[in-house]
Amino acid sequence: MPSTTREALLKKASKVRAKKRLGQNFLIEPSVLAKIVDSLNLSSEDIVLEIGPGLGFLTEVLLETGARVFAIELDREMVAHLQELKHPNLTVIHGDFLDFDISSIAPAAVAAGKKIKIVGNVPYQITTPIISHVFGEIGEPSPWLPSVASLTMTVQREVALRLSAEPGNKTYGQLTLLSNYYSVCKMILSIGKEMFVPQPDVESAVVQMTTLVKPSVVTENAEFLRKVIAGGFRERRKMLRNNLAFTQLSQEMLGQIFEDLKVAPSARAENLPLTTFALLSDAIQEKRRHEQESKLV
């Protein structure tokens, strides 16, 4: 059971002027805070990095599990509120998460094999940069990725749908494939506007991205795979084959690759899973190599 009430959290949140430029919307529903923490399956052995803790409503529930919590907050006023918690398992860090070296927290524990669970009710306008900071990009993993167990965030519901989308869905895109490459993503719950102070303009949801031990697909050149994905989604309404002109292969050559891989010639990027993109990427590189070798003969 939540150790506090919605009324108590509402009273605390109402005394503070939220900063719109920092995307501050305080989650005041104790049952939702509890569900977020339950999804992390925490114990006293765990290390948690909380992004943008604000007034510390989620922070306090995290601390109740006995976990070691590092809370990074950009707003100096919020840092002062957090420091009032005075909990032995809490370290408050004043800084910008997007510039933060994640491997700098609890280095001894990480060196011993402990992985960090990252969580936060994050500013919606920087959701994608946060994901990129934690995981990196396809072909360019972040230096701390091996130390990250999971990333759990309260985000705009539309973004949650994009992260967890299946091929063929209009919300399926580059962000989906980045998520699929480094993690297994699931939507945990939806959250109504009325559960925040101030109320956001959009519906929200909690997503959890559990880090894979290794990327979900094997490819010859992951950086080229990223280019193929970016090219494929550059103009969503176009057939994928037409969006791959940057590869400098003729439509006839691309058509042969599609046929060999049993991909429909009219396929669009949003219809293909990451595994097919990886096969396409490797086949395109092989075809390009063959063409270059032929010119040298």
Image (spheres, grey):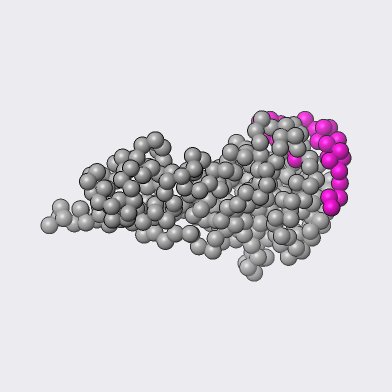
Give the magenta range. 1-27
109 vs 229, nearest the viewer: 229
Decide: is 77 above or below 292. above
Name which residue lies at 58% across and 52% down. Answer: 185
Q: Residue furthest bottom?
A: 112
Is 25 in the magenta? yes
Any part of residue 117 in sight: yes
Taking depth in this image into account, of 140 and 65 the one nearest to the observer is 65
Taking the spot 44% from the left edge, 59% from the top edge, the residue there is 217
- Quadrant where the C terminus sits is bottom left
Q: Position of residue 183 (x, y in %)?
A: 55, 56
Q: Quadrant of residue 212?
A: bottom right
Q: Is residue 18 visible?
A: no
At 28% from the left and 52% from the top, the residue drawn is: 259
* Quadrant hosting residue 103: bottom right
In the picture provided, is 48 more to the left or to the right than 30? Answer: left
Q: Is residue 72 magenta?
A: no
Is 280 left or right of 9, judged from the image as shown? left
Expressed as whole percent of the image width and height from the top left, the position of residue 173 reads 47, 43
Task: Please state the horizontal and vertical placement of residue 87, each as a whole percent of the image.
Answer: 83, 54
